Amino acid sequence: MSVAEPGLKKNYLTGLKEAIFEEFESDPNVIAIGEDIGFLGGAFGVTEGLKEKFGPDRVIDAPISEAAIVGVACGMCLNGKKAMVEMQFIDFISTGFDQIVNMTATYHYRTAGEVAINMVIRGPAGGYGGGALYHSQMNEAWFANSPGLKIVCPSTPADAKGLLKAAFRDPNPVMVYEMKELYRQNKISEVLKANDEALVPLGKGVVRREGEDVTIVTYGNNVYHCLQAADNLMSEGFSAEVIDIRSLVPLDEDIILESLKKTNRLVVVNEAPMTCGFAGEIVARMSDRAFDLLDAPPVRVTRLDTPVPWVKPLESFVLPSVNKITEAALRVCRY
Amino acid sequence: MATTEADQRKTKQESFELGAFSSKLSKSDFQELLLQLYLARYFDVRLIKEKKRGRLTGTLYSSHNQEAIIVGSLFGLKPTDWISPIHRDMPAFFMKDFRAGWRNPDRMGMSVGTVCAQVWGRVDSPGRARDNWSHIGSSAKRIIHSTSMLAGTIPAAAGVVYADRLDGGDAVVLTYNGEGSTAQGVFHEAVNFAAVHKLPVVTIIENNQWAYGTPTYLEFSMDDFARRADGYGIPGLVADGQNVLDVYDKVMEAVAWARSGKGPSIVECKTFRAYGHGDHDDDRAAKYRPKEEVDEGRARDPIAVMKRIMVAEGHMTQKEAANWVAEGKGASEVSNDDFPPEVVQYLSEGIEFAVNSPLPEAEEGGMWVYREDN
């Protein structure tokens, strides 16, 4: 498991797993802590085999306490370790909130650079799986609003592996929003690189599809919805450029700006609620930097300002969909 | 010092019997402990005077009447041990590892100058004055950086000793907490984690009877908070927080337990907050707390208690005990002449360093959000 097998296509979950095993292998200071990550191997199996291989001192089955998990990890990092925290679901992070935003995120700042907390906080996130209110959230905006944290959200197996590895290597606390609906989607499986070659730098977006008429900026699950919407737009005679930012903090503003120079039209898509969400942040930054470039008002396609409901018709009603994205992009193209 | 009824009652209760650890202390140890009590008290009253003279801004959180907890708990630590003080333990930052010499720059505690620079909000503070009062620390000196989130650093305390144990160390961590902070969920979550992993975490509860404006009976429904330890399957000890030797004995018992691999414990130190929550609260505290309760709570000044024990043990004459009478006096009633000169000198040097330290450059406000190097 620890060595990437050449030529074989791997899914998203395997990408995460390989990242963790490789980092554990290469650095004895790496420790993992979370609920059910040892004996069980994690609720989704991301850490399966980790405790057997690296022992109970380095792979800790913690009591059900996100506050203790994050706080203990913070203390370990204060004393020279690299700690990986698994949130069983990213929704549960709220009970560890204070330890993240007041304790961990501020550490470097309040010590004037003396301490950096080399922590990775990762966990399954996002909707589209019928997980209901407490197993579907995208709460990245809470943390994007807390200076000191970096935030990434990979959408492919290679990015899952590469960004997670980069998160381990970054000296700051990095949050990894994993798309649990993509964990075992074999249709996006791909060949993964090994060790340093697998690294994907934080703060670099990627163009998933080139186009001329409108720029659709997104991340996570919604990358695939946007690519389908781009197909729909093509049949309407418009070519859409789809940008996967991958990293929210820091944000690759330049890749969006370069695209707008070509398309002059902006649609931003994410599955968090609209109010004070990260989609609004992207629109605001482009208004600051590219107002004169825009030929149409930028549009956001987000979750409604609601929780995520359970059953399919309700969930579909509130989350962004291919149709909603297509319609919004057409409005922008025809403005 | 006038003898009140409460004073007599408390003095009667006072145990002069030495414990397993304090009975091994020498006369010079006793003298050093008393001197440290004077220093902690002097730090408190001097800062109040500095503020009244207009030389100092910012809120002060007095440790007046609670100094025995700071001094007694630190006295037996090894240099490699960690501490996690909070707002009412300000002297702990510079008194850690005092055994290595008060002015020794290599000891595992902060210099008094840098702590004063923090109080004054100057650039030579350990955190370059980015956060106020007790919100400093040092990973090099093994002092966990305090925050305003009560009980919020106990998980980190558990984490540092977990890491230390993995590296083959034998460090113990002392965490300091007001009794008010014990109602926080994170208090329970962290102590439970430490208990499960048998981590060397000694949780000191400074039970000073008041959480800001709320009395203990509205915080938890038990007389001895230490009994809460039963629920975690760990020992809970009660110490007389006015008696530096009893604090020393109980904390050393907990430290020995922890260092031998048996795990965490709770040491509840019974004491009383002499003034308001902070100096901004002194006037209101005089109203929300009955005068009789305050008089009784302050009747056993830790300096006076230590002197009585030293006289009883033959380490001090009655005449010597009358030499420096800082005990039983408030900041406005006390002067430099009530303190041993080495105490006044030591802190004055620290203050001198602080007032000569500049403010940080404004641009620093935007720095150090992230570490840039990999």
Image (spheres, coloured by chain):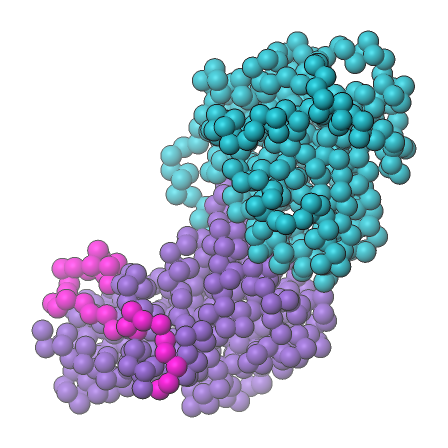
Residue pictured at 49% horizontal, 35% vertical: B132
Location of residue A81 by image quarter: bottom right
Location of residue B343 by image quarter: top right
Q: Is residue A293 left or right of residue A268?
A: left
Residue A188 belongs to magenta span:
no
In the image, residue B312 sits, relative to residue A125, either above or below, namely: above
Residue pictured at 80% horizontal, 30% vertical: B13
- Image mark count: 0
- State which quarter of the image contains the N terminus of chain A: bottom right
Q: Is residue A96 visible?
A: yes
Given the current orientation, which residue lies at the most extreme left position? Answer: A335
In the image, residue A14 sits, relative to residue B34, either above or below, namely: below
Colour purple belongs to chain: A
Residue pictured at 41% horizontal, 52% vertical: A147
- State which quarter of the image contains the C terminus of chain A: bottom left
Of residues B176 and A113, the one drawn nearer to the viewer in this rendering: B176
Residue A20 placed where, x, y %?
Answer: 58, 72
Residue A297 belongs to magenta span:
yes
Q: Colour of chain B?
A: cyan
Q: Is residue A309 left or right of residue A99?
A: left
Residue B133 placed where, x, y %?
Answer: 52, 34
Residue pictured at 84% horizontal, 52% vertical: B260
In the image, residue A23 sits, relative to residue A187, either above or below, namely: above
Of residues A194 and B57, the one drawn nearer to the viewer in this rendering: B57
Of residues B338 and A81, the one drawn nearer to the viewer in this rendering: B338
Residue A118 placed where, x, y %?
Answer: 56, 57
Q: In this view, does B38 lie to the left or right of A313?
A: right
Region in magenta: A283-312
Residue A149 placed where, x, y %?
Answer: 45, 57
In the image, residue A130 sits, relative to residue B308, either above or below, namely: below
